[in-house]
Amino acid sequence: MAYNSANLTRLGGASNGDLWLYSSADAIGTVNTSGYFNDAANMLSVRDVIIVCDTNTPTTNFVNVLSNTGTVVDVSDGTAIAETDGD
């Protein structure tokens, strides 16, 4: 699939970065590819954090914006949030 602007929501932020939520059926390996968020280049800034929720395979990752040239956005590989319950 491809980036869908309707699935990106700003949750809050400050002068040093914003927090976003992005839900998609795309796996983290697709979402963290350089250029995936290009259509949001005018909204995303370096150091912004995006909570990425994969709705197809229920997983959640934190990524941060590593670079934004104004047209090309690159995010980090992602840090998985454990979704297990051991008790």
Image: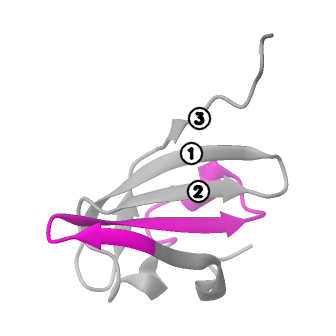
Compare marks 2 and 1 and give the one earlier in the sequence: 2
Tell me, yes or no, whether the two marked residues, 2 and 1, touch with CB atoms within 8 Å. yes
Q: Secondary structure at mark 1?
A: strand
Tell me, yes or no, whether the two marked residues, 3 and 1, touch with CB atoms within 8 Å. yes
Q: x, y (%) of residue 44?
A: 33, 76
- In 3D space, how far apart are the residues under numbered discs 2 and 1 (Cα atoms)? 5 Å
Of all residues, the one furthest to the front in this rendering is 87
Q: Give the residue pinned by disc 1.
A: 61
Tell me, yes or no, whether the two marked residues, 3 and 2, touch with CB atoms within 8 Å. no
Q: Secondary structure at mark 3?
A: loop
Rate crowding at label 3 as few (under 14), some (14 to 19) or many (20 or more) other CA atoms within 10 Å. Answer: few
Residue at image position (64%, 87%) is 6
Compare marks 3 and 2 and give the one earlier in the sequence: 2
Placement of 83 over or under 56, stated as above or below: above
- In 3D space, how far apart are the residues under numbered discs 3 and 1 (Cα atoms)? 6 Å
Q: Amino acid at mark 3?
A: Ile
Colour scheme employed for the rendering of this structure: one colour
Q: x, y (%) of residue 64?
A: 36, 54
Q: Give the residue pinned by disc 2.
A: 52
Seen from the viewer's position, the closer of residues 58 and 41 is 58
Q: Amino acid at mark 1?
A: Asn
Q: x, y (%) of residue 9?
A: 53, 77
Q: x, y (%) of residue 1?
A: 75, 72
- In 3D space, how far apart are the residues under numbered discs 3 and 2 (Cα atoms)? 10 Å
Residue at image position (37%, 71%) is 12
Q: Which mark is residue 81?
A: 3
Q: Which residues are magenta?
A: 11-36
Q: Amino acid at mark 2?
A: Val
